[in-house]
Image (cartoon, coloured by chain):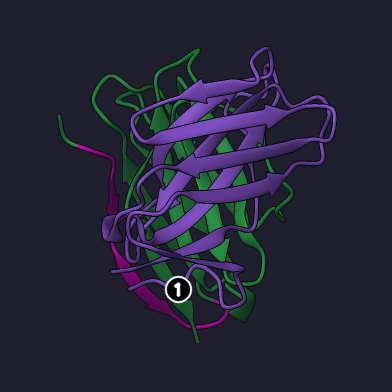
Chain colours: A purple, B green
């Protein structure tokens, strides 16, 4: 499969545990954020998004938290499963940036059965 | 509904050559964005097209160019290839006025 990063930080968790993946962003003008999951050999897959006027959003087994004060974003995955093993990226953009996203460097999640 | 398709999936070129990559967006999507992904630099935005017009571009040299056709299909071209252009090139499409992008599987370009 594709190698998306040779020196990515890695988070190893046991199946069934909760995972928390963190991301710091730099542009205080960013007002929209997305978390993506990328499996080997595939393009990034949308997981969940959040706008800057929110500080929390929940999806199925996933929650995104946004702290604009410290420019920090986190992705929480509940009851992590082996199928969640992948590289996770946060991405940010600003209003009227027409889909010009800035991506974080990524975190590799390794779920141990 | 078919996803974003990219062709070819793999490509090997020699330094100095040029290459054209193709992207077909999801039906109904008029915005197409291109990204370069490398182990060292991660995912970097190249440009975005909507209704055959480039609306935004990243910080890449002029050797990187693109276009979009009336059916929303897009191509990107890299001229005078350099070794550092070896990367996974990803295309993403979205409906206008939404940020939710759907990515294709990418084209793996290797420059030797």
Considering the image in quadrants, where does the N terminus of chain A appear?
Answer: bottom left
**B85 with respect to A93 (left or right):** left
Asked whether B4 falls inside the magenta stretch, the response is: yes
Point out residue A27 in the picture as x, y percentages from the top left corner. 81, 34
Q: Is residue B70 left or right of residue B77?
A: left
Q: Which residues fall within the magenta stretch? A: B3-16
Q: Residues within 10 Å of mark 1 (few under 14, many from 20)?
A: few
Q: Which residue is mark 1?
A: A3
Judge whether residue B80 can be spotted in this image. Answer: no
Element type at marker 1? loop
Q: Nearer the viewer, residue A75 or B58?
A: A75
Q: Quadrant of residue A61?
A: top left
Image quadrant holding the C terminus of chain A, namely bottom left
Residue at left offset 84%, top offset 35%: A70
Chain hosting mark 1: A
Seen in the picture, residue B32 relative to A3 is either above or below; the reply is above
- Residue in front for this viewpoint, B20 or A81: A81
User: Residue at horizontal 45%, vertical 31%?
Assistant: A48
Residue, x 61% and y 40% (percent of image)? A74
Q: Is residue B15 highlighted in magenta?
A: yes
Q: Nearer the viewer, residue B19 or A27?
A: A27
């Amino acid at each position: 499969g594709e190698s998306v990063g040779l020196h990515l930080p890695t988070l190893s968790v046991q199946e069934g545990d909760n995972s928390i993946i963190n991301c710091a962003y730099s542009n205080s003008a960013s007002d929209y954020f997305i978390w993506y999951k990328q499996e080997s050999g595939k393009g990034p897959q949308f997981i969940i998004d959040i706008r800057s006027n929110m500080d929390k959003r929940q999806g199925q087994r996933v929650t995104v938290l946004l702290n604009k004060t410290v420019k920090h974003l986190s992705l929480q995955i509940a009851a992590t499963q082996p199928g969640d093993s992948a590289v996770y990226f946060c991405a940010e953009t600003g209003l009227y940036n027409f889909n010009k996203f800035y991506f974080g460097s990524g975190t590799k999640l390794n779920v141990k059965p | 509904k078919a996803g974003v398709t990219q062709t070819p999936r793999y490509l090997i070129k020699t330094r100095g050559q040029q290459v054209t990559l193709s992207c077909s967006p999801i039906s109904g999507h008029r915005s197409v964005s291109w990204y370069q992904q490398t182990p060292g630099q991660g995912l970097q935005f190249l440009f975005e097209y909507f209704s055959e017009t480039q609306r935004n571009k990243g910080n890449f040299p002029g050797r990187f160019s693109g276009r979009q056709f009336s059916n929303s299909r897009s191509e990107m071209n890299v001229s005078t290839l350099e070794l550092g252009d070896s990367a996974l090139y990803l295309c993403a499409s979205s409906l206008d006025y939404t940020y939710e992008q759907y990515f294709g599987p990418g084209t793996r370009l290797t420059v030797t």
